[in-house]
Image (cartoon, rainbow, N blue to C red):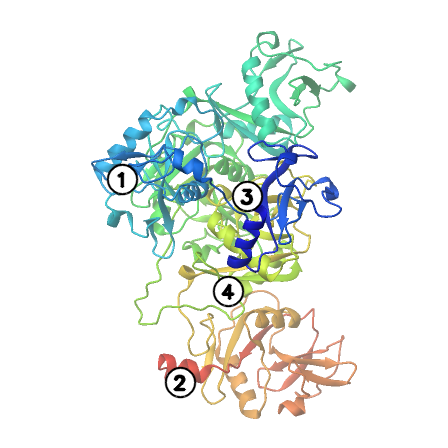
């Protein structure tokens, strides 16, 4: 009877439905179906469709009801409609009169005229919002000091200490979130915090660390002032923080990595700690089968000791069957297995490992919002710096800074140079003995992708400081990494062989978004390119490239399009992008994202240099693991989970353009590229490219700019192309073919004629005046160019780098002119 009533209701209200989830599953025991209330299937409606349940592929544990009333089993991961039910008997029996709600645990406050409920089941912010909404409430918003005091009182009285498990202690979620569109924090009701009536931030908050774009309130439970790092998990049973490092290292490197994070390579002290760690291990990384621990053989005594010198007999010491066996007489380090037993193994093998930080050893640097007390804040720069007095090579310096949740210092201004020079001058360098390169400190730039770039991906000129020392860079001895002399000048040094002091940098606030406000009189830019789409809640434009490329080629393609390779900043962006991928490329299982560890193994940075810890970073279980020893790039699957992978695979990818990254819009040419110039006489736009490329590469660059290699259609246009070629600066210092520029035509060996990129012969296009003795076809010269005098010339398609001209004709010129009242006067 109930099935008929519900089906009739669905047909009237949701006629398009085909099936819905119902509260029956075989989650507990395969093949034994029970209801969510624990009733056996035989005691309720159980009209199976013919052949059901069939448990296809041994993964159908949930049940749906079809529109014909029949049941069948399906995967529980499918996303389907469902119905919630509440019996009238239950409602009549329980009703919260004060709060006009069926939820009895809401408590009314007379002074505030509101009801509140403290949830003792920890959730992420997004799930907390949904839980409150499901109870016809909302995540609490503080509107006054009085309300803040009431919430603190509720929190203090809640039995929080009885709640076990992994969650952030010392804070409760509240109903506010960072909104890029207004560059401010707003409540779930849409007001800014100031408008709502309460904006009392904690010390050095908001700092934007990790994925922190949602709101919470601190409370004092003994931990709120004793934080360590967001990538470590606090385990209350042992009063310590732990981090499972899935990226495998040999024993010595694992020990070193923990030490530079101001932690230590974990070893279990007793049965209690082993039990807690094994539970955490099994819950978070069940695919890992063994991990290094901080115990090794002491060569002097031939006995096993912990890294802090404790005898093996005095700590947890449960050997596996037949262990230790010292195979080949080279097994001097211990690994822990999921059953809690040890075996000895070769220290040079690579395994995952755990770093540990006891709570009582944690210190907190409030000025820099970091557990590393040696960082010093510069108020003018709003940054913190640390001078490292142990010389290492550039690659290791990069990893040390990353381990401290900072980065190798990037110089952006003369003022910042002065800060670093002064810090270097005051550091007690002379007391440091040993073999290292004196007079220099490593800083964050290197030779990358044919230019000197910061680890943030900008050229040093774009970053704001490029004052080289005398005769620098000289490139001697493969010197491809960056250093600063004690006087502030830049020098190139060896990435591996030159050990130097170095400076790490921390930004005090990770959020640094810009508003869409322009003071030059231009209208607000609400468009980027026609092949990009703005997604909800992102204030950014995206393009899904289904044509697969390697990671480096994908990154380069996005740059050519005036964008950058996409990586998600937060869960909101992940949801929007995954929805976009599913709608436009539903057969895509995974995409490259713009994060890699190409600079230094294990140090994952965005294409703009942002550390992965400061943005969304949800890994698959057991990842990253560098399984192929060359997995330096990251892919994201359709669930939004990461894994490291080879960079030379060919995968789909996305490009992204944020609104706040716009400078101006080229309204004359209707493009985001300001260096396109409009010709009124020809009614077209042109750009002279001053970085010589091969013909094929030039054609790809023009296409990426929604243009094409220029095609002269008349003597007038040839003269114009010759004119801009002669006038534009040509200061390129490398090797290239001078005297010619690439144009948009090539030889068709089937038609035995020269054809433009639009498919016309040169004569049909309107211009075919060749330079003397051209075309001569030498060395397979099958692509087109133009002498600086405007006459045509043949060149090779692959091997001759030349300047080139892109051309854009736009059907929307007149429309754009009318909308923005643009006077199209020629600018020569």
Task: Name the residue that disc number 3 marks.
Answer: 604
Going from N to C along the chain, the mark reached first, 2 or 3, is: 3
Question: 588 or 803, which is in the foreground?
Answer: 588
Which secondary structure lies at badge 2?
loop
Task: Name the residue that disc number 4 marks.
Answer: 533
Return the mark for residue 114.
1
Task: Name the residue that disc number 2 marks.
Answer: 824
Viewer-nearest of discs 2 and 1: 1
Distance in Å between CA atoms under marks 1 and 4: 42 Å
Q: Position of residue 677 (x, y in %)?
A: 46, 78
**207 lies left or right of 398:** left
Q: Position of residue 186 (x, y in %)?
A: 33, 49
Distance in Å between CA atoms under marks 3 and 1: 46 Å
**298 lies left or right of 672:** right
Q: Residue at x 63, y 24 (%)?
A: 292
Which secondary structure lies at badge 4?
strand
CB-based contact (under 8 Å), mark 2 and mark 3? no
Which secondary structure lies at badge 1?
strand
Viewer-nearest of discs 4 and 3: 4
Above/below status of 760 relative to 330: below
CB-based contact (under 8 Å), mark 4 and mark 3? no
For residue 214, say whether it is visible.
yes
Q: Position of residue 447 (x, y in %)?
A: 55, 51
CB-based contact (under 8 Å), mark 1 and mark 4? no
């Amino acid at each position: 009877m109930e099935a008929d009533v519900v089906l009739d209701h669905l047909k009237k209200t949701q006629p398009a439905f085909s099936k819905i989830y119902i509260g029956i599953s075989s989650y507990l025991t395969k093949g034994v179906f029970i209801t969510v209330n624990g009733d056996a299937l035989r005691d309720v409606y159980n009209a199976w469709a013919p052949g059901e349940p069939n448990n296809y592929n041994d993964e159908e544990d949930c049940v749906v009801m079809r529109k014909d009333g029949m049941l069948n089993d399906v995967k529980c991961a499918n996303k389907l409609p469902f119905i919630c039910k509440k019996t009238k008997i239950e409602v009549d029996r329980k009703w919260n009169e004060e709060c006009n709600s069926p939820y009895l645990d809401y408590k009314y406050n007379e002074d505030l005229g509101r009801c509140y409920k403290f949830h003792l089941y920890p959730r992420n912010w997004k799930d907390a919002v949904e839980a409150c909404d499901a109870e016809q409430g909302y995540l609490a918003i503080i509107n006054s000091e009085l309300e803040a005091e009431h919430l603190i009182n509720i929190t203090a009285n809640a039995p929080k200490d009885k709640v076990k498990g992994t969650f952030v202690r010392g804070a409760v979620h509240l109903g506010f979130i960072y909104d890029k569109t207004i560059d401010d924090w707003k409540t779930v009701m849409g007001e800014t915090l100031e408008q709502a009536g309460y904006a009392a931030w904690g010390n050095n908050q908001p700092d934007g660390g990790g994925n922190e774009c949602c709101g919470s309130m601190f409370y004092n439970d003994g931990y709120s002032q004793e934080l360590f790092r967001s990538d470590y998990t606090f385990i209350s049973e042992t009063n310590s923080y732990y981090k499972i490092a899935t990226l495998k290292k040999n024993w010595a490197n694992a020990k070193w990595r923990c030490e530079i994070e101001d932690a230590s390579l974990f070893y279990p002290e007793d049965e209690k700690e082993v039990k807690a760690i094994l539970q955490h291990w099994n819950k978070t990384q069940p695919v890992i089968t063994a991990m290094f621990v901080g115990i090794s053989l002491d060569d002097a005594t031939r006995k096993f000791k912990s890294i802090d010198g404790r005898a093996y007999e005095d700590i947890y010491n449960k050997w596996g069957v037949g262990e230790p066996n010292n195979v080949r007489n080279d097994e001097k380090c211990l690994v822990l297995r999921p059953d809690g037993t040890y075996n000895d193994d070769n220290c040079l093998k690579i395994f995952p490992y755990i770093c540990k930080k006891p709570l009582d050893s944690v210190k907190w640097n409030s000025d820099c919002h970091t557990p590393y007390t040696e960082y010093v804040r510069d108020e003018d720069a709003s940054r913190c710096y640390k001078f490292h007095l142990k010389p290492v090579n550039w690659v290791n310096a990069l990893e040390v800074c990353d381990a401290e949740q900072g980065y190798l210092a990037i110089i952006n201004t003369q003022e910042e140079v002065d800060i670093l020079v002064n810090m270097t001058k005051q550091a007690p360098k002379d007391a440091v003995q040993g073999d290292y390169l004196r007079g220099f400190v490593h800083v964050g730039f290197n030779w990358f992708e044919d230019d000197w770039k910061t680890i943030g991906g900008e050229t040093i000129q774009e970053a704001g400081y490029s004052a080289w020392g005398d005769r620098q860079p000289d490139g001697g001895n493969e010197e491809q990494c960056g250093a600063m002399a004690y006087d502030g000048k830049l020098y190139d040094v060896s990435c591996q062989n030159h050990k130097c002091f170095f400076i790490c940098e921390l930004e005090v606030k990770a959020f640094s978004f810009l508003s869409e406000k322009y003071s030059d009189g231009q209208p607000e830019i609400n468009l980027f390119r026609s092949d990009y789409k703005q997604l909800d809640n992102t204030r950014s434009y995206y393009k899904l490239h289904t044509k697969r490329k390697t990671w480096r080629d994908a990154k380069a393609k996005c740059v050519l399009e005036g964008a950058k390779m996409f990586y998600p900043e937060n869960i909101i962006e992940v949801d929007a992008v995954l929805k976009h991928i599913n709608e436009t490329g539903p057969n895509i299982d995974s995409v490259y994202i713009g994060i890699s560890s190409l600079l230094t193994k294990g140090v994952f940075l965005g294409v703009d240099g942002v550390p992965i810890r400061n943005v969304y970073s949800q890994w698959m279980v057991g990842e990253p693991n560098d399984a192929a020893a060359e997995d330096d790039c990251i892919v994201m699957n359709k669930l939004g989970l990461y894994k490291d992978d080879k960079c030379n695979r060919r995968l789909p990818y996305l490009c992204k353009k944020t609104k706040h990254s716009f400078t101006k819009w080229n309204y004359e040419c209707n493009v985001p590229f300001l260096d396109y110039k409009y010709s009124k006489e020809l009614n077209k736009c042109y750009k002279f490219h001053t970085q010589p490329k091969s013909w094929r590469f030039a054609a790809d660059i023009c296409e990426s700019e929604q243009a094409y290699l220029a095609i002269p259609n008349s003597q007038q246009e040839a003269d114009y192309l010759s004119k801009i070629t002669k006038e534009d600066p040509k200061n390129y210092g490398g090797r290239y073919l001078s005297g010619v520029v690439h144009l948009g035509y090539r030889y068709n060996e089937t038609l035995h004629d020269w054809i433009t990129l639009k498919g016309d012969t040169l004569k049909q296009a309107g211009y075919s005046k060749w330079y003397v003795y051209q075309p001569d076809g030498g060395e397979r010269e099958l692509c087109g160019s133009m002498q600086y005098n405007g006459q045509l010339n043949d060149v090779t398609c692959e091997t001759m780098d030349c300047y080139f001209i892109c051309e854009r004709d736009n059907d929307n010129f007149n429309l754009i002119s009318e909308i923005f009242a643009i006077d199209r006067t020629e600018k020569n």
